[in-house]
Image (cartoon, grey):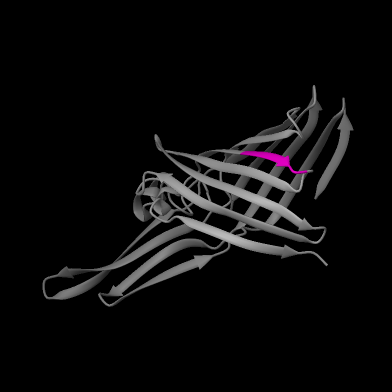
C-alpha cells in the first residue's frame, strides 16, 4: 500500500508492506553424520514501513527513502554429533535469528554540469543492500553472519556515476562505481563503458567490471582477481 502527495514542491510517499521476505533465509544446519550437512531455509514474514521524498533545489535533483523493517521472530538451530565415550550424541543449539527491527535508507542527488552537451553526475549513499539484514548477536555468533559477506549484516555503500555525450550525443562515455564500507575495510567496484548509437535502433556498447579491495572481509572484494570485459549490440524493434 502506498499513499503519495506533493507538498512545497516535494513529492512525498508513505508505504506499508506485509508479506514474505524476498529472499530465503538460512535458519538451520544439521550435520547428523560426517558425510553430509543439511541446510534449512524459509521465507519469513516481514512488515515494512516506508517514506520516500524527492524534489529539486537549484537544478539539483535529490531523493531520499527510509524503511523500517521488522522480520518475523524465528529461531535458528545447529545440530552436530559429539563423541561421548564410544557413542555419538546429537547436540542441538537454538538461538533467536531476529530480535529487533532495523532501518534501511538511501539518500541521493543528480546534477548536469553545463560542459559541452552536459556532464551528468549522480551519487547515492545506501545503508543496507537488498540481501542484508540485522541478525541477533547470538545468531551472528552461531552462524557467522557479519558485515562484508553476502546475506550478512547491514553495511554502507557510496554509489556514483558520471556520463558525457559527444558526436551529436551518439557516443556516451560513462564510468560508475560502488564503494563498500564493511567493518573498517573497503572495496571498490568500477564499471567504465562506451556506448555508441550506430543507428536509431542499433546501440553498440563495450565496457569492463573491475574490483579492488580486501578479499576476505568485503562483499565485492572477493572478486578482486576477476576482471571482466564485455561487448554487446542492442537492437530495438
Between 40 and 9, the one lying in front of the other is 9
- Quarter of the view holding residue 6: top right
Q: Does 39 lie within the magenta span?
A: no
Q: Residue at x 49, y 57 (%)?
A: 228
What is the residue that sits farthest to the top in this orientation? 58
- Quarter of the view holding residue 5: top right
Q: Position of residue 135 (x, y in %)?
A: 47, 48
205 up-or-down from 61: above or below: below
Between 63 and 161, the one lying in front of the other is 161
Q: Position of residue 175 (x, y in %)?
A: 60, 42
Q: Which segment did they paint magenta?
A: 161-167
Q: How many numbered tags mark residues here?
A: 0
Left or right: where 13 falls relative to 73? right
Q: Residue at x 72, y 51 (%)?
A: 17
Q: Position of residue 87 (x, y in %)?
A: 16, 76
Between 5 and 126, the one lying in front of the other is 126
Residue 63 visible in the shown view: no
Q: Residue at x 38, y 54 (%)?
A: 225
Q: Position of residue 116 (x, y in %)?
A: 75, 31
What is the residue that sits farthest to the front in this orientation? 167
* Magenta: main secondary structure: strand
205 up-or-down from 62: above or below: below
Left or right: where 83 falls relative to 112? left
Residue 182 visible in the shown view: yes
Between 37 and 193, the one lying in front of the other is 193
Amino acid at each position: 500500500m502506498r499513499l503519495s502527495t506533493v507538498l512545497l514542491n516535494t513529492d512525498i510517499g508513505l508505504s506499508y508492506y506485509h508479506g514474505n521476505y524476498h529472499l530465503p533465509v538460512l535458519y538451520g544446519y544439521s550435520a547428523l553424520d560426517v558425510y553430509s550437512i543439511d541446510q534449512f531455509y524459509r521465507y519469513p514474514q516481514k512488515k515494512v514501513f516506508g517514506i520516500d521524498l524527492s524534489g529539486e533545489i537549484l537544478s539539483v535533483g535529490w531523493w531520499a527513502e527510509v524503511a523500517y523493517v521488522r522480520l518475523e521472530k524465528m529461531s535458528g538451530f545447529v545440530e552436530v554429533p559429539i563423541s561421548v565415550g564410544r557413542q555419538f550424541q546429537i547436540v542441538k543449539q537454538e538461538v533467536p535469528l531476529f530480535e529487533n527491527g532495523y532501518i534501511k535508507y538511501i539518500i541521493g542527488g543528480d546534477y548536469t554540469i553545463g560542459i559541452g552537451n552536459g556532464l551528468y553526475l549522480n551519487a547515492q549513499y545506501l545503508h543496507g543492500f537488498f540481501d542484508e539484514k540485522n541478525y541477533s548477536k547470538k545468531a551472528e555468533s552461531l552462524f557467522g553472519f557479519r558485515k562484508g559477506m553476502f546475506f550478512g549484516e547491514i553495511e554502507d555503500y557510496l554509489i556514483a556515476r558520471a556520463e558525457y555525450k559527444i558526436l551529436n550525443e551518439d557516443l556516451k562515455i560513462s564510468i560508475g562505481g560502488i564503494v563498500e564500507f564493511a567493518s573498517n575495510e573497503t572495496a571498490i567496484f568500477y564499471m567504465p563503458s562506451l556506448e555508441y548509437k550506430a543507428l536509431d535502433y542499433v546501440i553498440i556498447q563495450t565496457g569492463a567490471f573491475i574490483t579492488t579491495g580486501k578479499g576476505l572481509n568485503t562483499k565485492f572484494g572477493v572478486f578482486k582477481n576477476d576482471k571482466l570485459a564485455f561487448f554487446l549490440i542492442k537492437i530495438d524493434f
